Amino acid sequence: MDFHQLRIFTTVFRLGSFTKASKTLNISQPTISEHIKNLEKELSCKLFDRLGRAIRPTAEANLLYPRSQQLLDSLARLHDDLIHSKTLIQGEIIIGASTIPGTYLLPKMVVDFAKTNPLVTFQVLIDDTDKITEMVLNHELFCGCVGAKQHSPNLKYQTFYKDKLILVGQRKFKQKGKIKSNQLNDFPFLMREQGSGTRRCMEEYFIGIGVDPAHLKIIATLGSTASVKEAAIQGLGVTVLSQLAVEKELAEGSLHPIEVAGLTMARDFYLVKHNRRTPPLQYLAFCQSIGDSGDDS
Amino acid sequence: MDFHQLRIFTTVFRLGSFTKASKTLNISQPTISEHIKNLEKELSCKLFDRLGRAIRPTAEANLLYPRSQQLLDSLARLHDDLIHSKTLIQGEIIIGASTIPGTYLLPKMVVDFAKTNPLVTFQVLIDDTDKITEMVLNHELFCGCVGAKQHSPNLKYQTFYKDKLILVGQRKFKQKGKIKSNQLNDFPFLMREQGSGTRRCMEEYFIGIGVDPAHLKIIATLGSTASVKEAAIQGLGVTVLSQLAVEKELAEGSLHPIEVAGLTMARDFYLVKHNRRTPPLQYLAFCQSIGDSGDDS
DNA sequence: AAACACCATGGACTTTCACCAACTCCGAAT
DNA sequence: ATTCGGAGTTGGTGAAAGTCCATGGTGTTT
């Protein structure tokens, strides 16, 4: 009893004729006979009484018809739904993110996306880069937003925001023009804890211009971007922060950029996806909306 | 998208593995791959991400699975219902009947049958033999209960009650022993109208023993069995009635049989069905309960 | 009675189904 | 790094099913 047989049966039932059904379905009349015969054999009951010119459905056929029709309808609806599921963008997007993009970048993007896709709901999960990457690898997340690439054949990265780190502090720390790199040791530094992506990135850039981070005058180490920023606003020292995190403070004047000669600390954020998973449609739309070109790694 | 594909898909989905599904379904693993591939092609979407060792269902698969499962369940239920419809005797039986069997015979049979088949309801349609036979031929009835056969290759008769007609009247008409046939002309006769099956039958028998019905002393012609019987009870005359119709009166003594030498008016009733229709189960059960041996004509 | 309409049957052909064996791919263990 | 085993894919073959055409029976219509 497959759909083909049921389709033939319902057509015969509805039209009350093997021949008409064969024309409607564009298959030959003997084929109809054959299928009906098989169906009758499988159900071990007659479905139609053949009365010379006409046929009449039996009680079993009357029982079978509505339910058979219903099954066919369900199937057609299912088929359509699946085909059209590629048109309607809806559902939940769970996106993992490390601190900076999760706090300063994604909220805006999410709002923008939600404007044109009102049926999509978001859940942003903030954790550190390694944890997010791990979750993508383990299929706990379809995509994550992280500040560093981890080499793996199963991961696909896509640059989605070019940020930079800048040195900031109260006006009193600001000097005319750029400072020299060797002057950095004179500043009281506020630092993020070891393991912070921001700190690691900063230290690499400092080493790149010949400044040993170990020789900095670190007056405090704080556990979050927000606390470091607050301390800097209070004038406790200077610190290196993501430009994204201090945009408002720079505009207000509560913090000022301190430019260092020869130092530009670019820091890209990446969207990471598993190489082989097919994400649901809403993810594809979201990735595309932030400028997906497939991948870049 | 047929049931076979869906069955394979749901099994793969549930077990999370092509190989396990192949073992469960007793088909080879490459066949599974093939079917999944075809399904994916038809729906133009990936259903499983192949990740080396494991597979993971995509969003589309998650959408497809429950509905697919539901379709399969419905199909199985439908199949079972049809198979078991041959076990459960229920539904309505509409049976056509001519006057005598409809009034005196069927009610008892219906009650007897209903005792052992409480789920069956009855509708007894009383009309004359020709009308009932016509309705059976036109498929308006599955079966009828009539007092005469009509020759047609499309009709199947089955004797289901052997009745006889008897001459009855008040005690005053009764004589010692049987009367001779030529004495019949002395009795005041109550007759049914022309066209009555009972009358036609009686006349044939009278002619058979050399009594011309036209010479009978007919003192009244009445339109129904009940009215003739009532008139006979009142002593207006004698009449020929179905034994079925006067059983109670004979037992009470309000009517008495008048036996005529050499005259036995057997009258069979038949169950008539269309030769080629397959009646619903409850009809088969009913016909069998009244002693169906297939057919006898 | 002949023509017609309809379903059933039989034989030939095409497509699908299912299998096997060999292959690729990936991840884990040595 | 290499090997090893589980998993899915590919290609070729035989069997089964699906389909068609032409034809045969049967009841209805003219």
Image (cartoon, coloured by chain):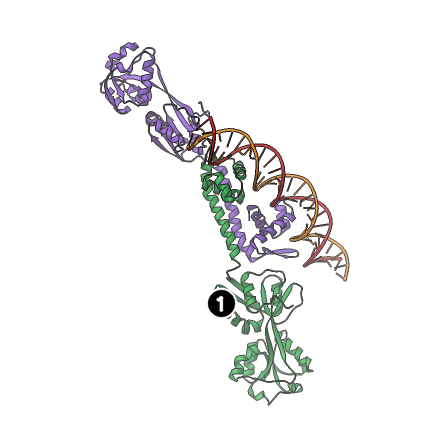
Chain colours: A green, B purple, C red, D orange
Q: How far across and how far down the image is residue A101, in percent? A: 57, 72
Q: How far across and how far down the image is residue A297, in percent? A: 65, 68
Determine whether, in the image, residue B18 is placed left or right of residue A26.
Answer: right
The chain identifier of the residue carrying mark 1 reads A
- Nearest the viewer among A3 and B62 is A3
**Label 1's element?**
helix
The answer, for residue B179, to whether it is visible in the render is: no
The answer, for residue B27, to whether it is visible in the render is: yes
- Nearest the viewer among B153 and B197 is B153
| Relative to B41, residue B244 above or below | above
> On the image, which quarter does residue A227 sit in?
bottom right
User: In the rendered structure, which amino acid carries the disc numbered 1?
Assistant: Thr
| Relative to A146, residue B103 above or below | above
Number of numbered discs on residues? 1
Q: How far across and how far down the image is residue A296, in percent? A: 63, 68
Q: Which residue is mark 1?
A: A116
> On the image, which quarter does residue A15 sit in?
top left
Determine whether, in the image, residue B12 is placed left or right of residue A208.
Answer: left
Which residue sits at x=50%, y=50%?
A76
Farthest residue to the bottom: give it. Answer: A176
| Relative to B190, residue A177 above or below | below
Which residue sits at x=50%, y=42%?
A23
- Nearest the viewer among A15 and B166 is A15
On-image quarter of the C terminus of chain B: top left
* Crowd tier of the residue under label 1, counting other residues whose Cα lies within 10 Å: few below 14, some 14–19, many 20 or above: few
Q: How far across and how far down the image is residue B48, in percent? A: 60, 55
Determine whether, in the image, residue B115 is placed left or right of residue B170.
Answer: right
Determine whether, in the image, residue C18 is placed left or right of residue A31.
Answer: right
